[in-house]
Image (cartoon, grey):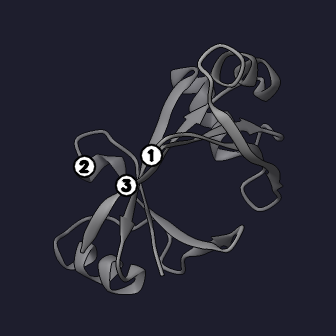
Amino acid sequence: MITGIDHVGIAVRDLDAALRVYRDKLGFHVEKIYVHETEEVRTAVISSGTCRFELIQPVSEESPVAKFLARRGEGVNYVSLQVDNLDHALQEFKALGLTVLREVPTVAEGRRYSFLHPKNTMGVLFEVTGP
C-alpha cells in the first residue's frame, strides 16, 4: 500500500528567507513555486537527488499552516506518504481505526492527497498521496 515517502512539508513564516537557506546554503533546486488558494499557502517545491521538500508559508491567518506555526513554530509540518491507490489506502486506514481528515481527497498541482490525524499516528501528521 505505502510505496515510499513522497516529500516532507516544512512550515515557514517567510518563504523567501527559507529559500535563502535551503536553496542558497544547502543547495536545493527549486522545482516550482505556487500559491494554493484552497490551503491558503504559498509553496516552494524543492529537491536534491531523491530528497523532496515543500516549504509552506501561510498567506492567511486562517490557513491550517498559520495555526500550526502559532502552536509549534517553524519546522516539519507533515510527512507525505506515496501510496499505489489513494482511495483504497484511505479506506484501509479508516478500517484500521485511523482518522482520515479529508474523506474526499484534495487536488492540487495535479496531485490528489488527504491527511491522517496525528492523534492516531504518534503525533505525526501524515499526508497520503497517490493516484
Secondary element under disc 1, as helix, strand or loop, is loop
Left or right, residue 69 beside residue 81: right
Determine the image quadrant of residue 71.
top right
Q: Which mark is residue 50?
A: 1
Determine the image quadrant of residue 48.
top right
Q: Which residue is at the front of the view, 21 or 88?
A: 21
Between marks 1 and 3 in the image, the one whose residue lies nearer the viewer = 1
Q: Going from the N terminus, do you reach mark 1 or mark 2 first?
A: 1
Q: How many residues crowd mark 3 within 10 Å: few (<14), some (14–19), many (20+)?
A: some
Identity of the residue drawn at 50% across and 70% down: 102
Q: How many residues crowd mark 2 within 10 Å: few (<14), some (14–19), many (20+)?
A: few
> Does 65 appear above or below 74?
below
Q: Which residue is mark 2?
A: 121
Q: How many residues crowd mark 1 within 10 Å: few (<14), some (14–19), many (20+)?
A: few
Q: Going from the N terminus, do you reach mark 1 or mark 3 first?
A: 1
Identity of the residue drawn at 76% across and 62% down: 38
The answer to the question of whether label 2 and label 3 lie on touching residues, with beta carbons closer than 8 A, is yes
Which three-letter amino acid code belongs to the residue tagged 3?
A: His
Q: Which residue is mark 3?
A: 117
Between marks 1 and 2 in the image, the one whose residue lies nearer the viewer = 1
